[in-house]
């Protein structure tokens, strides 16, 4: 059974066409991440799935049921928001139990579900506190707890980590991954951060300007991007793009090389002058200019390279990507 | 830490200015209060003196109690003010919620139309209002006043509240929708508590003009049984003779309820939002 199926989904606000013909399937238990630059429609798509926005045309079905006309609370979903969106006048326990009370669940069920969620999220000590008395990380855990207690068919996450600081973001990311392991429920996760997408997803959906650019596992997308946009969006540091004429005279194509596929070699075709060096300990990122084009090379280990040095780089075999002037991938 | 705030000289100057302003603002009230407890002669001889054993007199209060049904006036004013305020707040907040939350055709126009009332003084329409009230038989009823004051207060209420409601996090409302709360519950339980300071502002802005209004009570409800306090006090002000004892006593008593209402609302104003729902 498919957890979620989108068929030809379109969404317009007045004259602005935000989602264009989206087709997508999410398998049961799959962790799907929507990723794309801001304004690409990923949050709108999530809100359409949640039922907070109606589709202009097309079909949304959750768990095999068409839910176009079903209100959000009866779609069997739970959502975690970027801003946590906890009810300020209710304590943690009541925040979590509200939806269950609305569903008219028995007291016993509510107690059990809350106990289960608090155990998973280590929230036992905070049940009687109000949201204003919690830290950012705790609030986000409560928000996740509020979603878990509903036993939804589908979890929706709307940039849940954006408001957390870097260290906490790593931890919470792990927690969400663990949660998915334990619950084995389908999850749809929206983010603009490609590293979250790469680390969490079973399947990544790259969106741009309301269109799906590519769908696939993180490594599929990384190793085999269909166009320049996907190639440039995934991976950090981002892929280097330069005119192919830099290495072979008269070539009109665009050449793409990932930073880790550049290596230092005196015979290398790319003669570069070093602008800046980032020493990360494990890696060294060299930012250099080849003629007027900036490239980044990621060298493994520690290298003593000074800005201003003249270096030559080679490209690893079979690691070059070519794109035409519209950004489409050229193979062969 | 801000240096200007910790400097004792600045603090003293700041408090000095505030205290001075408080004194100036309270002075007329103070003069009314002390003179309401003096004999007529003492009021004119030494207006600023405190009531002494010689000059102390309750004659003003006695006149007010005897002449006219002061408590009825009082009750009328209270009913008109409280009911009008309730209507303004409830309907104003609902309209503001609809305007700020839902996308529908003519949303913008509707908002502008409702805001137009801020710019047009309702008194311009007095004749038409009077004709309407006569036609509907509402003349000399408190309902007439309540309706007019509600109409008068709504535009500003809608304008202010819709601005504030736009700032309430969408995520919070959406979380409520996903949890199965009805739109009414979202409005009353999630949104209203968060815009409480704005509601208090609207309440205070509307309360005082309604309580003090003389125009509409005089025109729409001058009958004995529907007189408001302000109108009732006018009997003591004559063209040739004014019973100052009675006027000052009536005024002193009229201040009290506004003061109480103000204290209630201003506490809300100060309390602010208990945030934490949204970063």
Image (cartoon, coloured by chain):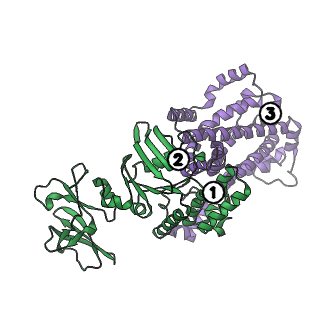
Q: Residue furthest front?
A: A1
Instruction: Classify residue A36 by image quadrant.
Output: bottom left
Image coords of residue A258 (percent x, y): 27, 64
**Chain A image colour:** green
- Few, some or many residues within 10 Å of mark 2 (<14, 14–19, 20+): many
Asked if disc 3 and disc 1 are in contact, CB closer than 8 Å, the reply is no
Q: Is the same chain shared between marks 3 and 2?
A: no
Query: Marks 3 and 2: CB-CB under 8 Å?
Result: no
In the rendering, which numbered label is found on residue B160? none
Q: Residue at x 60, y 67 (%)?
A: A120
Q: Colour of chain B?
A: purple
**Callout 1: SS:** loop
Task: Count numbered badges in the picture.
Answer: 3
Helix, strand or loop for disc 2: strand
Q: Position of residue A18 (x, y in %)?
A: 41, 43
Q: Chain of mark 2?
A: A
Q: Which mark is residue A62?
A: 2
- Helix, strand or loop at label 3? It is helix
Q: Give above or below for B134 relative to B116.
A: above
Quarter location, residue B246: top right
Which labelled disc corresponds to residue B235? 3
Q: Give the spatial CA distance, label 3 vs label 1.
A: 52 Å
Mark 2 and mark 1: Cα distance apart in space: 31 Å
Q: CA distance from mark 3 to mark 2?
A: 74 Å
Is A138 situated left or right of A315 in this image? right
Q: Is residue B249 visible?
A: yes
Residue at the disc numbered 1: A88
Q: Mark yes or no: residue B24 visible.
A: no
Tell me what residue is drawn at x 71 percent, y 23 percent. Answer: B133
Determine whether, in the image, residue B91 is placed left or right of residue A212.
Answer: right
């Amino acid at each position: 059974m498919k957890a979620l199926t989108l068929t030809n989904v379109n969404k317009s606000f007045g004259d602005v066409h935000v989602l264009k013909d989206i087709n997508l399937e999410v398998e049961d238990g799959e962790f799907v991440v929507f990723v794309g630059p801001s304004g690409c429609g990923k949050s709108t798509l999530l809100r359409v799935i949640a039922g907070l926005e109606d589709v202009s045309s097309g079909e949304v079905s959750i768990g095999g049921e068409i839910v176009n006309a079903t209100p959000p609370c009866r779609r069997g979903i739970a959502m975690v928001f970027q801003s946590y969106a906890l009810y300020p006048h209710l304590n943690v326990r009541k925040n979590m139990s509200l939806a269950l009370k609305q569903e008219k669940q028995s007291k016993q069920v509510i107690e059990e579900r809350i106990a289960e969620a608090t155990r998973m999220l280590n929230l036992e000590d905070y049940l009687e506190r109000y949201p204003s008395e919690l830290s950012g990380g705790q609030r986000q855990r409560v928000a996740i707890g509020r979603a878990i207690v509903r036993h939804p068919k589908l979890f929706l996450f709307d940039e849940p980590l954006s408001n957390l600081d870097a260290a906490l973001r790593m931890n919470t990311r792990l927690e969400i991954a663990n949660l998915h392991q334990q619950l084995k429920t389908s999850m749809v996760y929206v983010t603009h951060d490609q590293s979250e997408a790469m680390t969490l997803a079973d399947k990544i959906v790259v969106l741009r300007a309301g269109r799906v650019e590519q769908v696939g596992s993180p490594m599929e997308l990384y190793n085999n991007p269909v166009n320049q946009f996907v190639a440039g969006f995934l991976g950090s540091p981002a892929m280097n793009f330069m005119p192919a004429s830099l290495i072979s005279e008269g070539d009109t194509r665009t050449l793409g090389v990932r930073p880790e596929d550049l290596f230092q070699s005196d015979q290398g075709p790319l003669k570069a002058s070093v602008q800046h060096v980032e020493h990360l300990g494990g890696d060294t990122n060299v930012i250099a200019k080849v003629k007027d084009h900036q490239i980044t090379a990621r060298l493994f280990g520690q290298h003593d390279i000074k800005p201003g040095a003249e270096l030559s780089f080679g490209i690893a075999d079979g690691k070059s990507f070519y794109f035409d002037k519209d950004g489409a991938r050229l193979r062969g | 830490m801000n240096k200007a705030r910790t400097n004792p000289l600045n603090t003293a100057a700041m408090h000095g200015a505030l205290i001075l302003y408080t004194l100036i603002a309270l002075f007329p009230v103070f003069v009314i209060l002390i003179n309401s407890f003096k004999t007529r002669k003492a009021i004119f001889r030494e207006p600023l003196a405190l009531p002494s054993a010689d000059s102390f007199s309750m004659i003003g209060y006695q006149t007010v109690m005897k002449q006219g049904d002061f408590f009825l006036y009082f009750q009328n004013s209270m009913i008109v003010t409280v009911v009008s305020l309730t209507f303004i707040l409830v309907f104003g907040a609902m309209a503001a919620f609809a305007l700020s939350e839902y996308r529908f055709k003519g949303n913008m126009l509707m908002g502008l139309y409702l805001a137009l009332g801020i710019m047009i003084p309702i008194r311009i329409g007095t004749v038409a209002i009077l004709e309407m009230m006569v036609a509907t038989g509402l003349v000399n009823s408190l309902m007439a006043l309540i309706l007019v004051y509600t109409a008068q207060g709504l535009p500003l209420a809608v304008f202010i509240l819709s601005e504030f409601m736009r700032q309430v996090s969408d995520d919070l409302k959406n979380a409520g929708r996903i949890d199965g709360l009805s739109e009414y519950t979202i409005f009353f339980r999630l949104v209203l508590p968060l815009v409480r300071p704005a509601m208090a502002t609207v309440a205070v802005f509307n309360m005082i003009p309604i309580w003090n209004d003389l125009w509409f009570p005089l025109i729409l409800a001058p009958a004995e049984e529907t007189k408001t306090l302000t109108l009732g006090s006018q009997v003591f002000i004559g063209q040739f003779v004014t019973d100052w004892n009675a006027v000052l006593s009536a005024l002193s008593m009229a201040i009290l309820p506004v003061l109480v209402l103000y204290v209630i609302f201003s506490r809300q104003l100060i309390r602010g939002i208990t945030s934490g729902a949204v970063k």
